[in-house]
Amino acid sequence: MTLQEAFENIKDERIDRCKKHNLIDILMLMFMGVLCGYKSIEQIQFYATLSEQTLKKYLKLENGIPSSDTILRVLARIDAKQLEKVFIEYARETFGKHIAENEVVAIDGKTIRRSEYVSTGENKKPHKAAHVVSAWAHSLGVCFGQVKTEEKSNEITAIPELLDLLDLKGMIITIDAMGCQKKIVEKIAEKEAEYVISLKGNQQSIHRDVKEFFEHPCDGAYCQCYHIQRGEYTIEIGHGRIEKRTCYLCGNIDWLSEKDEWKNLNGVGMLVCERTVKKTGKKSVEQRYFLTSLTDVHKAAFAMRAHWGIENNLHWVLDAILDEDYCLVRKDNAAANLSVLRKIVLNILKQVDFSDIISTKKMPLLHKQHLCNKREDCLDRVLLSL
């Protein structure tokens, strides 16, 4: 399935007599604009106007380049749920065959900061900033899906919706404490996946029990009695800091009163992070707790560490490279739909290889965007790979 074929599954909500420009052309125009490094609809429209002859190699553009107002209206009217499903299906078909066994899939939410607005007219109504929940595959470095939360809802209702849309069999799902809910754990079990979920005060009783359990010194006898596994890791995390991580996983949870209320719960764990600043020698220690269906401490520790990839490699890139939080596109579904297009671009740029054009060990995404913008052969390579 090519990207254009995927876009064909999106229903065009416009009246027939108003369809001067093809819906797929508008979506591909936006995709190519983001691919080439442009941030706003106005910039993308200006780029398309200057590059119309080049773009006609890939698109029909029977009535020329649509105006920025037209692009915004179309983007705002597209059903966000439809575009999200198309994105998930396209990502599954494109990258699904490359998924390794026990792939860690991190699920987390992000608010598009400047998408908050007040509707015009007599009945002025404030609209919250769009909030989306995404699934990030750690080893592949791609986003596998996105679901926009409803305006009067939150991540707790959006996460099961996203899980329903994904094929997660055999994967390890990681979620922060917001998603530490019995129904979410049950949904993960239904999808035949494993889980590692952060545990904090929002689950007050089980958090208290686990915390009190690990306050006891984990000596040899205690570890043997409760089947506690231990793993130690030392990581150089940059900026003159060294972090030592010690992970404890308790497999004997007969003492846990709520153990039967959490589907497939096989262990509870604690991750102790001891951070040292090399220059000053100053140390800080932090304990984090988690629930898991895993029985191996090394897999659990790896999953806990891998979860932060969604923050560093997805959310940070969306803001720092693609300027998502500074974008003023906010009308109706426009912010959420543009977020999907950014993630498609990010997935593709992560995979495309320009090493034969510019010899470098690792090419930043900004450089790849610049190549797509300035060199037609690079743009050809990306679009032909779709």
Image: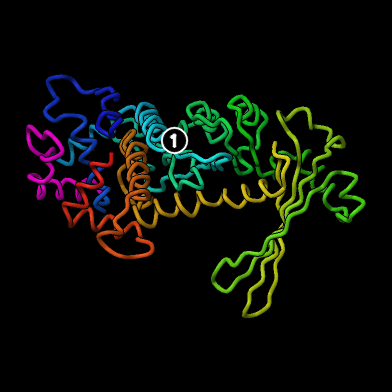
Side of 11 relative to 274 (left or right):
left
In which quadrant is the N terminus drawn?
top left
Instruction: Tell me which colouring the rendered structure shows.
Output: rainbow
Inspect the magenta stretch and tell me whether residue 58 lies in it.
yes
Q: Nearer the viewer, residue 249 or 62?
A: 249
Quadrant (top left/top right/bottom left/bottom right) for the C terminus: top left
Q: For the residue carrying disc 1, how many other residues have a C-alpha within 10 Å: few (<14), some (14-19), or many (20+)? A: few
**Left or right: residue 16 compared with residue 101:** left
In the image, residue 80 sits, relative to residue 267, either above or below, namely: above
Q: Position of residue 50 (x, y in %)?
A: 9, 50
How many numbered marks have been drawn onto this rendered protein structure? 1
Look at 7% across and 33% down and name the residue there.
Answer: 63
Question: Does dot 1 land on a helix, a strand or a loop?
Answer: helix
Instruction: Determine the residue located farthest toward the front in the rendered image.
Output: 356
Residue 121: name its quadrant.
top left
Residue stretch rendered in magenta on the structure: 40-66
Q: Amino acid at mark 1?
A: Lys
Q: Is residue 317 above or below residue 279?
A: above
Tell whether 327 sits left or right of 135.
left
Where residue 137 sits: x, y (%)?
A: 49, 43
Q: Residue furthest right?
A: 221
Residue 252 point in image, percent of width and height: 84, 39
Q: Does the segment drawn in magenta span residue 348?
A: no
Q: Quadrant of residue 117 in the image?
A: top left
Q: Position of residue 249 (x, y in %)?
A: 76, 47
Write down the quadrant of residue 181 in the picture: top right
Q: Which residue is mark 1?
A: 97
**Residue at 38%, 62% in the rendered image:** 362
Question: Looking at the image, is 63 positioned above or below residue 276?
Answer: above
Q: Nearer the viewer, residue 283 or 117?
A: 283
Which residue is painted at 39% across and 29% down in the image? 89
Furthest-bottom residue in view?
279
